[in-house]
């Protein structure tokens, strides 16, 4: 074979390899832009994506993740959290916050979410599903007249609680109806001083919850009576099935730190929890 023919043959092979490489790269681009399935992230916010000032390490260089009503730094995200969140957010087709925060406490105060007018979020303990800053039309349709009925029920429950306090059944606590975007979310119950809610008061609140078919959530100093539609898991299922129309090829990851997050975490294929949170501590105790 002449030298010229050898050169022509090598050039032809190289051109074919170049074409094959381009085809492979084009295939990879198409695979990334049109995947068979989507990565969907359902995530709690406080103590999952970021932590409050009191939990920061001294001399920390954490980034501001959320601010208070006056715009002052309130919560922070560590460098390590920024690393994994950036990686996860970069892969996700959809990130849906699932939080007890109100609509305005997410839209106006959380800095680590790139929310747009089309972004979906679940706020106010699952009472509201938002698209941007507004209640999603399909969620409003789903709620129907339930908010009107819940308002009457929660107000009646508040009167009953006040009557029992007046009767001296237990120490008085502060009772307030919380409403978000004109939808009743829950009846907030707090001690009027710094003392914990005592067992007699908690027992009375449990009786009221059963009487009015409400859900009671309580910790040491605060309690809440919620209507049935204020449910993170139910709202998350609605978003996955009705709004995102997930398929069997979609992968769903749930992020949360609290035992109360477990119901919505169970809707996904994987659950991720910080090692400083309640879920992890309970798992550690049960493993001993």
Image (tube, rainbow, N blue to C red):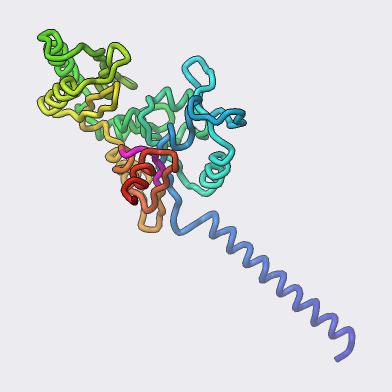
Residue 201 picture location, percent across and down = 18, 20
Span colored in magenta: 254-259
Q: Is residue 118 above or below residue 107?
A: below
Quadrant in which residue 156 is drawn: top left
Quadrant in which residue 264 is drawn: top left
Q: Nearer the viewer, residue 232 or 219?
A: 219
Q: Nearer the viewer, residue 226 or 115?
A: 226
Q: Please report the residue visible at 54 percent of the width from the left and 54 percent of the height from the top.
A: 33
Q: Is residue 145 above or below residue 84?
A: above
Q: Is residue 167 above or below residue 136?
A: above
The quarter of the picture where the N terminus appears is: bottom right
Q: Is residue 183 above or below residue 130?
A: above
Q: Is residue 258 magenta?
A: yes
Q: Please report the residue visible at 37 percent of the width from the left and 53 percent of the height from the top.
A: 269
Side of 258 where 61 appears, left or right: right
Q: Outermost residue, bottom direction?
A: 1
Q: Is residue 32 magenta?
A: no
Residue 221 picture location, percent across and down = 29, 21
Residue 54 picture location, percent across and down = 48, 25
> Number of marks in the image?
0
Residue 251 picture location, percent across and down = 41, 53
Side of 36 where 128 appears, left or right: left
Q: Outermost residue, top direction?
A: 166
Q: Please report the residue visible at 41 percent of the width from the left and 43 percent of the height from the top.
A: 255
Q: Outermost residue, front direction?
A: 288
């Amino acid at each position: 074979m002449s030298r010229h023919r050898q050169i022509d043959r090598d050039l032809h092979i190289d051109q074919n390899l170049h074409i094959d490489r381009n085809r492979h790269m084009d295939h990879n681009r198409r695979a990334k832009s049109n995947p068979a399935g989507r990565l969907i992230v359902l995530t709690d916010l406080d103590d999952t994506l970021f932590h409050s000032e009191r939990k920061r390490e001294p001399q920390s260089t954490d980034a501001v993740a959320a601010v208070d009503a006056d715009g002052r730094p309130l919560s922070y995200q560590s460098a390590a959290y920024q690393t994994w969140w950036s990686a996860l957010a970069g892969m996700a087709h959809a990130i849906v916050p699932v939080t007890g925060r109100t609509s305005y406490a997410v839209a106006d105060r959380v800095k680590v979410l790139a929310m747009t007018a089309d972004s979906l979020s679940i706020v106010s303990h699952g009472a509201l599903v938002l698209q941007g800053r507004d209640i999603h039309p399909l969620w409003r349709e789903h709620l129907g007249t339930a908010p009107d009925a819940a308002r009457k029920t929660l107000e009646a429950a508040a009167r009953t609680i006040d009557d029992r306090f007046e009767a001296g059944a237990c120490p008085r606590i502060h009772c307030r109806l919380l409403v978000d975007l004109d939808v009743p979310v829950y009846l907030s119950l707090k001690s009027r001083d710094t003392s914990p809610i005592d067992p007699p008061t908690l027992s009375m609140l449990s009786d009221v919850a059963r009487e009015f078919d409400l859900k009671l959530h309580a910790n040491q100093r605060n309690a809440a009576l919620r209507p049935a539609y204020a449910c993170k898991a139910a709202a998350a299922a609605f978003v996955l099935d009705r709004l995102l129309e997930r398929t069997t090829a979609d992968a769903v990851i749930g992020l949360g730190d609290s035992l109360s997050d477990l119901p919505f975490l169970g809707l996904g294929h994987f659950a991720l929890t910080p090692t400083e949170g309640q879920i992890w501590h309970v798992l550690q105790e049960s493993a001993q």
